[in-house]
Amino acid sequence: MPDPSDNSEAASSVHQLVGEIGGRFAVQGQLAQAAEINSGHINSTFSGSYLQEDGTVQRYVFQSINRNVFKDPYGVMRNVERVTRHINNKVLRTKRDLGGQTLNLYPARTGESWVEDASGGVWRCYNFIEGCVTYDVVETPRQAFQAARAFGSFQDLVSDLDASLIRETIPDFHHTPKRFQRLLDVAAADPMGRLESVRAEFEFALARQKITTILTDSITAGTVPIRVTHNDTKINNVMIDAATDEAVCVIDLDTVMPGLALYDFGDLVRSATSPAAEDEKDLSKVEMRMPIFEALVEGYLDSARPFLTNEELGHLVLGGKLMTFEVGIRFLTDYLEGDVYFKTHRPGHNLDRCRTQFRLVGCIEEQEDAMNAFVRKVFNGGA
Ligand code: GN1
Ligand code: MG
């Protein structure tokens, strides 16, 4: 039986950590409660509830940036400052105050938007978006529609932000051929001696090498435009109003960089269409749910149709297949390397994740024609 004192010890160390970090930001009130938010594979995230003099409680989010992943955390913060300021200025100009329902950085007492801890960790503080939930698995077409529309609106809101001012926080983040080459290099070195045990997954990847270059070739040919994009449009990166199931705002802005609209739409297809968790071990649960895909297309086009080109529209399904494949090879690479990038919570975690992604690629391949037919029907105005 686990020792119950372990839990309370962990809770009190979380309380102490949030107390220390929170005290360095310009937040008001007395820290009453602190908790770790265990979502996301990269950063460490905590919430702090602060009791105000009038008896109300104000919640904040504190997040430390993973410096192994983000080599220039200050560059990340400059981007986040720029993007949140841009969005907030525009949203507040066109709508009335949304009641704190956009992402805001709270300043540190130094006036900067971050603090550094004793071990060099860089922290920021955001408002806690109240009354919202996030989904790791989409339950209804409405949620899918809302999430996709929210990411389309996000792209629209940052479309007049000068892309040259946005730093590339992770160079070549969605350069699929480079991701593929990295898999080959790590497999050749096989530092953990794991390659033999993933032969089937490795062969699956090798058999699809030729799809990796389609979008990078389009970029080179100038047929798809580079935009400011979110680049991590995982379904749990959109806050959904718990009462109405309406999308309120998108979060996790660390990878906002010049990219393709197709990466954003593609990662939605990857993370929303399957009813199975990303790390589900029972692969028979993985599927590409057509009604969810259709809702993603409709929601995304509802906000993004005015600016998307025909070339982009023609590649929406490919974007979904490619992003699913890309994340699959990233999980496989990390497994072969010894789980050094993504946070893992059990042995073989990255391999389990890779397998769901590859299964989903297979499901997309089976339904690709029907998916493309639906996109054509919608953009010809026939849905
Ligand atoms: C990571 O941070 P999080 O968990 O939202 C990763 C994404 C992957 C995703 C897979 C900076 O996203 O690229 O698609 O895991 N983020 C980074 O679940 O690498
Ligand atoms: Mg995230």
Image: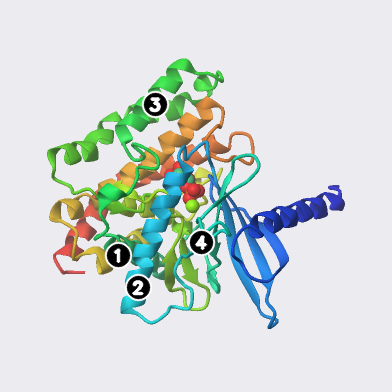
Mark earlier in primary sequence (1, 2):
2
Sequence-wise, the earlier of marks 3 and 1 is 1
Q: CA distance from mark 4 to mark 2?
A: 25 Å
Q: Which residue is mark 2?
A: 91
> Mark 4 vs mark 3: which is more N-terminal?
4
Q: Which residue is mark 1?
A: 157
The residue located at (63%, 61%) in the rendering is 47
Count residues near mark 1 (Cα–Cα under 10 Å), then give few for <14, some for 14-19, many for 20+. some
Q: Is residue 325 above or below residue 336?
A: below
User: In front of the other: label 1 or label 4?
Assistant: 1
Farthest residue, direction front: 110
Q: Position of residue 344 (x, y in %)?
A: 59, 39
Q: Which residue is pictured at 58% across the width and 59% down the height?
A: 109
Above or below residue 129? Residue 174 is above
Tell me which amino acid carries mark 3: Arg
Label 4, on which residue?
135
